[in-house]
Image (tube, rainbow, N blue to C red):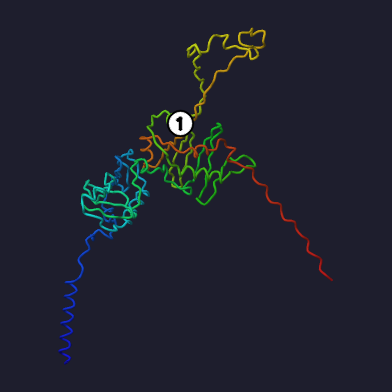
Amino acid sequence: MKLKTLLVVVALLAVASLAAYYLGRPGKPAGSDARVGQPLLAGTTLEQASSLKLTENGKTVTLTKTATGGWQVSEYHGFPADFQKLARFSGDLTAAKVERLVTQNPERIQSFNFNGARLVFSDAGGKELWSLDLGKNAEGGGRLVRYGTETKAYLTRLTTFLDTEPKNWADAAMLALKNEEIARVELSFADGSAPMTVARAKKEDAFTATDAPAGQQLKVARIDSLLTSLVALRFSDTSDPTDANAVAARSNARSVKLTTFDGKSYTVALGRKPEQKIVKAPEAKKDGSTGPAALGNLSDLIKSPEAPAGSNADAAGPAQVLEPATETIPAGPVYAFVSSSDATATIDSLMAKRAFQIFEGAFTGLPQSRSELFEPIPPAPSPAPVTAPAPASK
């Protein structure tokens, strides 16, 4: 066969093979979809979003972006949102992939428990950018989801917890400070001793006190520990500023003033309603009398411990006045009251809205007296004995 004829035959066979492939290739899988293999949430949607609404079990929390680029919790007094928590949540959504299209059958979709667990990202104008319904967990792992109003159900490996408690989204940090930023600390004491100040010239220096008692030095580690607890102050709950416990805490607060190297100052007052002892109301007598009548008459209150009932008390020994029963009411929760000289700080406006309850460790860790912050100066080490040189050998 001539070469030219051979080339023509090969070309024709190639065309026939390609035609057979395209005509005989399998169709697109029934479960295939453009979303499969893609992130559950695209990063571009996050960039455009100005609000996030989470709903589940009849509860809703809304996070909105502020003019300065931060986020706040609408249902919790407009408090700043915990940005780290929001970042983790958004990261879970962008990291999860759509694994497969499960069904487009409306009857099957109804059995997937799309009953209100929902996420919605919207833009600044309130227009919905992206929404997702969360259904039940799949038997083989993962969770069933549905986009918007689509009649499609997908499987994804999203495992994030849908937290719809507004307070849990609020940033609990009360001070955005670090130990190394503090140049000066002013302290007051519970025992009424004079306030004291410790300071340092540079962040790498140790704090010193100018009025240390003779032969004493500052416990620098104690000051560092105190600072750590104050700059990391976080609230555990909030209440109305007129709450009785909050009002009593403010009246019994002790303050610490922190001044930074750039001249800003923060005053932190910590307090609680003190423990109380009250006289218990008398229990009802067998005759049914209560209140003052339950105490009986004067002879009921003055009894001899040796005298049997109905005997002559004077003959039995000295009389004893019965002490009234008392009841101890525990101290109230600890509250923190913070004020700042920084006009850009949000803490002052938040303090006007709510009273901040904190864990008691920061309060109980405050020094009660000046003496707790000083220790004896250790004696200088003794000079090493001088050893005489050995005599030279002959």
Mark 1 secondary-structure assignment: helix
Image quarter where the N terminus lies is bottom left
Q: Residue 319, relative to residue 394: is it above or below?
A: above
Left or right of 30 on screen, residue 193: right
Residue lying at the far right of the rendered structure: 394
Q: Residues within 10 Å of mark 1 (few under 14, many from 20)?
A: many
- Residue 159 spot, x, y in % from top left: 35, 52
Residue reaching furthest bottom?
2
Can you identify the residue that label 1 sits on?
249
Measured as percent of width and height from the top left, residue 144 is found at 29, 52
Q: Is residue 310 left or right of residue 284?
A: right
Q: Position of residue 277 (x, y in %)?
A: 52, 24
Residue at the spot x=40%, y=29% of the render? 243
Say if 42 sits above or below 215 in the image.
below
Image label count: 1
What's the amino acid at mark 1? Ala
Q: Nearer the viewer, residue 214 or 162?
A: 162
Residue 105 x %, y %: 21, 53
Q: Quadrant of the C terminus?
A: bottom right
Camera-nearest residue between 167 and 31:
31
Task: Write the residue at 66% across / 12% down.
Answer: 318
